[in-house]
Image (cartoon, helix red, strand yellow):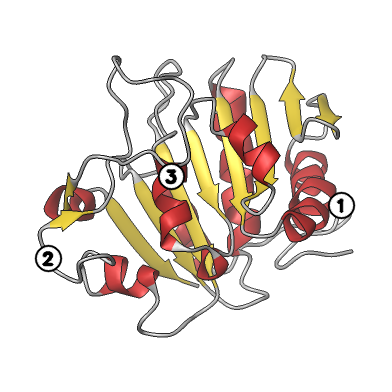
């Protein structure tokens, strides 16, 4: 099954001008990056490729790809996009798919975890770890409350790798939290400019195993927006 924007193994991948702009954007220092585009825009492939690059760069780093439905993320990412990215861009790099546990491991001990947020048991297992990258795939389907919990695990220190949160979605309604947060620059909970309803980083004194009813600390909206970039493909 092909995924959106996937190059075939035998094709010569030639990114469009907009995809080249997205690749350049992902090289920036911002903490939050949202890519918006249609079904054939290549946004998911670009972000998965960036995660693989980051995993190869920093040994023993962890990265999470999360979608709302487990029965959607496994065939689309775990069985399609991620293996294709390895085969196309990194054919000589060995990797192992741990199907039961739900992650891929690399020779440098990095891990790429994949889960649906509706799979309670697996989500609790994943959220017991810290990650250098969190990718919220098709986030138009993900409730904002789940986003807040997931972002608290963006806390792993892995060498010189900056922590990064990636988001992608098809164009959605103006009332969706992505438009409110990234577009209108308002808190999706209070609808006010000033403070967001989450703090993506935990202090050292807080538990490494995060309960799902965790109440995160507020973050300055101005601080979030200084570290956020959006691109429509």
Alpha carbon of mark 1 to alpha carbon of mark 2: how far? Answer: 46 Å
Q: Considering depth in this image, is 134 or 101 the residue closer to the camera?
A: 101
Query: Is the C-beta separation of discs 2 and 3 under 8 Å?
Result: no
The residue carrying pointer 3 sits among few (fewer than 14), some (14 to 19) or many (20 or more) residues within 10 Å by Cα, namely many
- In the displayed structure, would residue 230 be above or below residue 92? below
Q: Secondary structure at mark 1?
A: loop
Q: Residue at x 12, y 65 (%)?
A: 193
> Which residue lies under the disc numbered 3?
149
> Which residue lies under the disc numbered 1?
9
Give the percent coordinates (x, y) of residue 227.
Answer: 25, 48
Q: Residue at x 61, y 45 (%)?
A: 65
Q: Residue at x 39, y 37 (%)?
A: 152
As drawn, is 107 to the left or to the right of 65?
right
Alpha carbon of mark 2 to alpha carbon of mark 3: how far? Answer: 21 Å
Q: Secondary structure at mark 2?
A: loop
Q: Does label 1 or label 2 sit earlier along the sequence?
A: 1
**Which quarter of the rendered picture does the N terminus lie within?**
bottom right
> Which residue lies under the disc numbered 2?
193
Q: Does label 1 or label 3 sit earlier along the sequence?
A: 1
Front position among marks 1 and 2: 2
Alpha carbon of mark 1 to alpha carbon of mark 3: how far? Answer: 37 Å
- In the displayed structure, would residue 123 be above or below residue 193? above
The residue carrying pointer 1 sits among few (fewer than 14), some (14 to 19) or many (20 or more) residues within 10 Å by Cα, namely few
């Amino acid at each position: 099954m092909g995924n959106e924007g996937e190059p075939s193994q035998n094709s010569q991948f030639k990114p469009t001008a907009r995809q080249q702009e997205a690749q350049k954007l992902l090289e920036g220092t911002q903490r939050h990056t949202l890519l918006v585009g249609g079904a054939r825009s290549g946004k998911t492939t670009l972000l998965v490729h960036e995660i693989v690059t980051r995993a190869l760069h920093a040994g023993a780093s962890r990265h999470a790809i999360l979608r709302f439905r487990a029965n959607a993320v496994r065939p689309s990412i775990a069985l399609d996009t991620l293996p294709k990215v390895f085969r196309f861009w990194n054919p000589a790099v060995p990797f192992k798919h741990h199907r039961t546990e739900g992650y891929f491991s690399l020779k440098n001990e990095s891990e790429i975890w994949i889960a649906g947020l509706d799979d309670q048991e697996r989500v609790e297992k994943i959220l017991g770890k810290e990650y250098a990258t969190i990718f919220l795939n098709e986030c138009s389907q993900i409730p904002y409350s789940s986003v807040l919990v997931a972002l608290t695990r963006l806390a792993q220190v892995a060498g010189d790798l900056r922590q990064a949160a990636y988001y992608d979605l098809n164009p959605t309604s103006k009332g969706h939290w992505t438009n409110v947060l990234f577009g209108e620059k308002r808190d999706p909970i209070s609808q006010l400019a000033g403070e967001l309803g989450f703090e993506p980083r935990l202090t050292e004194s807080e538990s490494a195993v995060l309960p799902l009813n965790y109440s995160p600390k507020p973050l300055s909206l101005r601080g979030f927006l200084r570290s956020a970039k959006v691109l429509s493909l």
